Amino acid sequence: MCKVSVIIPVYNVERYLPACLDSVLSQSLQDLEIIAIDDASPDHCGQILDAYAEKDRRVRVIHLTENHMQGYGRNRGLEAARGDYIYFLDSDDMIEHDALEKLTKLCDREQLDGVFFDSEPLFETEELRKRYDLYPAVRTGEYPRETITGSQLLDLFTKQKDWVVYVQRQFWRKDFLLQNRVWSPEGIEHEDEFFSFQVILLAKRVQYIRETFFIRRFRADSVMTRPKMPKDFHGYFITYLRMMDFVMETGIDTYGSMAHRIHMYSCMLDCLPQFIRQADPKEWFSPEELRLYELFLAMHEAEKVASKQRLDFWKPLKGYRTIWIYGAGRVANSAGTCLIEADYPLEGFLVSKKEGNPDVLLDRPVIAFDEYKKQKSTSVIVVAMAKQMQLEVEKLLKARNMRYFFYVGNVLEGPFGEDD
């Protein structure tokens, strides 16, 4: 038994491996073990690991005869772990000298399932520094110091745009992982997406601390920096399916979990062109997965057609620099949403009387028509309200010589009023 098991899958990183191992073995907390999984690395990683194991009994090496990727290695390490706590580290990264000591003390004192913390980037080149300058190393939101549930913390992370899935910025109690059967997906890239999704939603007692314990190395040819490949789409697609299954099986669904599924869908779309060009789906998916992939493609094509129709619908407004919607009810909300999705310059909403109407709608101001200053001919008003109310509004617009359209159901009527 020991306090912490540090699990490190290792593949083709002989240049960085010693620094990674040294950062763990030199921890202020000495009651630890390293479980290093040599994932059939083609370089000298296996020999480096064996040399470290000979010098320090805390290093245990598992040599695999075939490459199985990160998730498989992490799972084998978790099965073999003897520590009270688990920390997953990548073999080209490092951790701060006192990280494990502070994390174990916090978890022991507060009886936590897990802890989330921050990182410090280490860029190998100036080009990488410029390219990943916006990498979210330190969270900027406001968070409670007390213990909360994982679902609550995920919602806070998501709403403040601070959610990152890196398992290296998490520290977990082993019994919690085993009792909840939290394992990493095997055989796919981006396995940390689903691991982090399920583990935070299942956790009952977690904290976030504003400490930069993890040192992330940005180097050429890593999963993050290399060009997109078919295995990226494959990983995101399988992760998305597992997320949907998880929510259905557990009934756990929150703002944060929904937002992350939407994010995963966006990642899929981002990698889809490369997959379509370069991959044979039958080689990547099981028969059931293939059926779901074909359904996804059909839905994606249908959405592209619908998107084009939405753009065609609003074409009469093309060329106007600013668009205002007259109305602030259900019809106006629908029209405004469509305009925003179609990337048209919606400035705000006009109402006959401010009383009883919101101050803001769809993040745009709602103002009284009397306060509206007539703009140049590059501005137009879309009247979006019940048809019986449009006649009264039309009188106001004609009196001020304004150009306007009527938004009626699925029809855009106009333009009416002043000519350009």
Image (cartoon, helix red, strand yellow):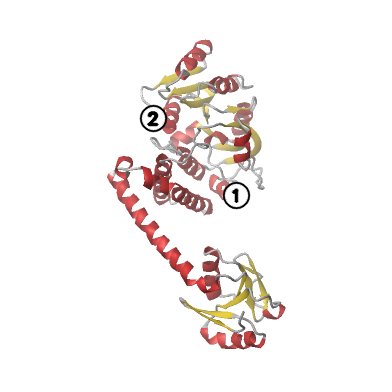
* Residue type at tag 2: His
Kindly check if marks 1 and 2 are in contact, taking CB atoms under 8 A apart as contact: no
Whole-number angstrom distance, CA of label 1 to CA of label 2: 33 Å
Q: In the displayed structure, does residue 138 sit left or right of residue 68?
A: right
Residue occupying image coordinates x 50% and y 71%: 315
Nearer the observer, 257 or 352: 352
* Image coords of residue 320 (percent x, y): 60, 71
Examine the image and state in which quarter residue 209 appears: top right
Which quadrant does the C terminus fall into? bottom right
- Does the image show residue 119? no
Residue found farthest to the front: 420
Nearer the observer, 120 or 126: 126
* Residue type at tag 1: Lys
Residue 327 vertical position relative to residue 265 in the rendered view, above or below: below
Circle number at residue 3: none
- Does the image show residue 182? yes
Residue occupying image coordinates x 58% and y 70%: 319
Residue 207 vertical position relative to residue 351 in the rendered view, above or below: above
* Image coords of residue 393 (percent x, y): 60, 85
Residue occupying image coordinates x 46% and y 41%: 228
Q: In the displayed structure, does residue 389 sit left or right of residue 251?
A: right
Residue 19 vertical position relative to residue 336 in the rendered view, above or below: above
For label 2, the residue is 68
Residue occupying image coordinates x 55% and y 65%: 340
Q: Secondary structure at mark 1?
A: loop
For label 1, the residue is 161
